[in-house]
Image (cartoon, rainbow, N blue to C red):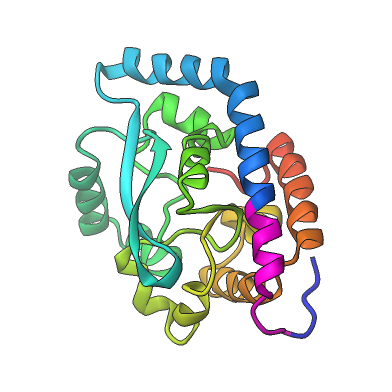
C-alpha cells in the first residue's frame, strides 16, 4: 500500500463511525468464530494444562495502559528461554534489538506456532475491541519496552486506539522492519477513514489466508 500526505487526526464523526463498525464487526466475528475459539482454547489447555489466555499490558489511546488478550502461544518459562538465547546467541540478540521479535523463537510452543501462523492467537482481542480499548484497525499495540523506540511518533500512536490489524500486517507483517512499521502505524493513526478501515480489513483476510510474514 502506498502512503500519501499525512493528514490531521480524523474528525469526531469519523471516529464515531469507525467505533460503530468496530462494535458491529467484532460482535459478528465472535458469534461466527466462537466454536473455533473454543477449540483453540482446548488445544492450548491440553498441551500443558495451563491457561489458554495470555494478558499483557499494552499502551492504548491517550497513553493509558490496558490488558491486551491473546491466545497463549508461549511456554510457561518464556522469559527464562528468551534470556538464555539472548545471552548465548549474538545473532538472535541483534535480531531482537532490531525487530523486537525472533524468527526462531524458543519461547513458542508447537500449538503456538500454528496459531501464530494462522493468526488465531489474535482472536481474543475482539473482546478488547468490545471494551473500547482497541479498534479492529489501528497501530499495533505496543509494550513499555517499545515506547522509547517510537520516539516522537509515540504521541501520534496515542491519538487513536491500537488495532487488531493495520497497514503493516497487510504489508508483510514480520518481513517489515521495525522502523518502517513505526512509520506505517504513524501514517495509519493520522489517515484512518472508514474507507481505509474497510480496505485494511479486506487486506487482512487475504494476509491471513496466505500467512505472509507470519511466524
Q: Is residue 14 magenta?
A: yes
Q: Is residue 141 magenta?
A: no
Apparent side of residue 140 relative to residue 54 in the rendered image (left or right): right
Q: Nearer the viewer, residue 196 or 85?
A: 196
- Where's residue 107, x and y in %? 32, 40
- Where's residue 147, x and y in %? 36, 73
Apparent side of residue 63 relative to residue 192 in the rendered image (left or right): left
- Quadrant of the rendered image containing residue 88: bottom left
Q: Nearer the viewer, residue 87 or 99?
A: 99
Q: Residue at x 58, y 44 (%)?
A: 214
Q: Residue at x 55, y 20 (%)?
A: 34
Q: Residue at x 28, y 33 (%)?
A: 75
In the rendered view, tell whether residue 107 sits above or below residue 2.
Answer: above
Q: Residue at x 80, y 80 (%)?
A: 4
- Where's residue 139, x and y in %? 56, 63
Q: Quadrant of the N terminus?
A: bottom right
In the rendered view, tell whether residue 159 sits above or below residue 77.
Answer: below
Which span of residues is magenta-colored? Answer: 6-19
Amino acid at each position: 500500500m502506498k502512503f500519501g500526505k499525512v493528514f490531521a487526526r480524523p474528525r469526531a464523526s469519523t471516529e464515531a463511525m469507525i467505533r460503530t463498525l468496530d462494535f458491529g464487526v467484532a460482535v459478528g466475528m465472535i458469534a461466527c468464530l466462537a466454536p473455533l475459539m473454543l477449540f483453540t482454547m482446548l488445544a492450548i489447555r491440553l498441551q500443558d494444562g495451563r491457561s489458554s489466555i495470555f494478558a499483557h499490558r499494552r499502551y492504548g489511546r491517550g497513553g493509558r495502559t490496558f490488558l491486551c488478550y491473546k491466545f497463549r502461544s508461549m511456554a510457561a518459562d518464556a522469559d527464562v528461554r528468551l534470556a538464555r538465547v539472548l545471552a548465548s546467541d549474538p545473532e538472535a540478540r541483534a535480531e531482537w534489538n532490531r525487530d523486537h521479535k525472533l524468527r526462531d523463537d524458543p519461547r513458542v510452543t508447537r500449538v503456538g506456532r500454528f496459531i501464530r501462523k494462522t493468526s488465531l492467537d489474535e482472536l481474543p482481542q475482539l473482546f478488547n475491541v468490545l471494551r473500547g480499548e482497541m479498534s479492529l484497525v489501528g497501530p499495533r499495540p505496543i509494550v513499555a519496552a517499545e515506547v522509547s523506540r517510537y520516539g516522537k511518533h509515540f504521541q501520534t500512536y496515542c491519538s487513536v486506539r491500537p488495532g487488531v490489524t493495520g497497514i503493516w500486517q497487510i504489508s508483510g507483517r514480520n518481513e517489515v522492519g521495525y522502523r518502517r512499521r513505526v512509520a506505517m502505524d504513524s501514517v495509519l493513526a493520522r489517515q484512518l477513514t472508514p474507507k481505509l478501515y474497510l480496505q485494511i480489513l479486506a487486506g487482512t483476510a487475504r494476509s491471513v489466508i496466505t500467512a505472509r510474514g507470519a511466524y
